[in-house]
Amino acid sequence: MLYFMEVYGNIKRENRQTLVLTHLSQLLDFVTGFGGLIVPLIIWITQRDKIVDMDETGKAILNFQITMILLGVLSIPLILFALLGLVLLGLVVLFSLVFPIVNAIKANNGEAPYYPLSIKFIS
């Protein structure tokens, strides 16, 4: 079902399915090894002015993905010096798997996304 909303002279439509797919597209990293950052970025760039809440969702996803990539890279030298790196890498994998699914469910229910530990690179 589509709803229309007037925002700054532009008409945006509500499309929860696209929001859900944008969240779930982050899981491409687990399937193909890449795409978890690129696909949401492409969807966000092309749809942010057309779909209600896509701008907020896209920024949250990109900030989360960039943060997880940085934490993953940071864990590599920590693995060499201490086992703390393995714990950090395990948490990165766990967060990267769980939070896209949780936020896809929230998007389907019309709720705002929440990604913990995200550094605001894009605001």
Image (cartoon, rainbow, N blue to C red):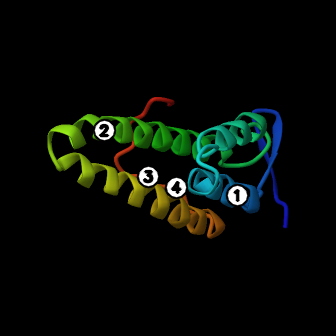
Q: Is residue 1 above or below residue 72?
A: below
SS of the residue at dot 1? helix
The amino acid marked with disc number 1 is Leu
Please give the residue where the numbered disc 3 appears in the rendered image. 115
- Determine the CA span between mark 4 and mark 3: 7 Å
Question: Contact (CB < 8 A) between labels 4 and 2?
Answer: no
Q: Which residue is mark 2?
A: 76
User: Could you tell which of marks 3 and 2 lies nearer the N-terminus?
Assistant: 2
Q: How many marks?
A: 4
The residue pinned by badge 1 equals: 21
Relative image position of residue 14 (x, y in whole percent) = 77, 56
> Image point 17% across, 50% down: which residue?
83
The disc labelled 2 sits on which kind of residue?
Answer: Ile
CA gap between label 3 and label 1 equals: 16 Å
- Is label 4 in a helix, a strand or a loop? loop
User: Reading the chain from its start, which is encountered first: label 4 or label 2?
Assistant: 2
Q: Amino acid at mark 4?
A: Pro
**In this picture, is 78 found above or below 104?**
above
Residue that carries the numbered disc 4 in the rendered image: 113
Residue 30 placement (x, y as % from top left): 56, 56
Whether tag 4 and tag 1 are in contact, CB under 8 A, the answer is no
Q: Nearer the viewer, mark 4 or mark 2?
A: 2
What residue appears at the point 56 percent right and 39 percent down from the top-left corner?
59
- Give the secondary structure at mark 2: helix
Mark 3: few, some, or many residues within 10 Å (few <14, many ≥20)?
A: some
Figure quadrant of residue 31: bottom right
4 and 3 marks in contact (CB < 8 Å): yes
Q: Nearer the viewer, residue 74 or 103?
A: 74
Instruction: Give the left or right position of residue 8, taking residue 111 as reference.
Output: right
How far apart in space, not on screen, are marks 4 and 2 (Cα)?
29 Å
Specify which label sits upstream in the sequence, 1 or 2.
1
- Amino acid type assigned to the residue bearing label 3 in the image: Tyr
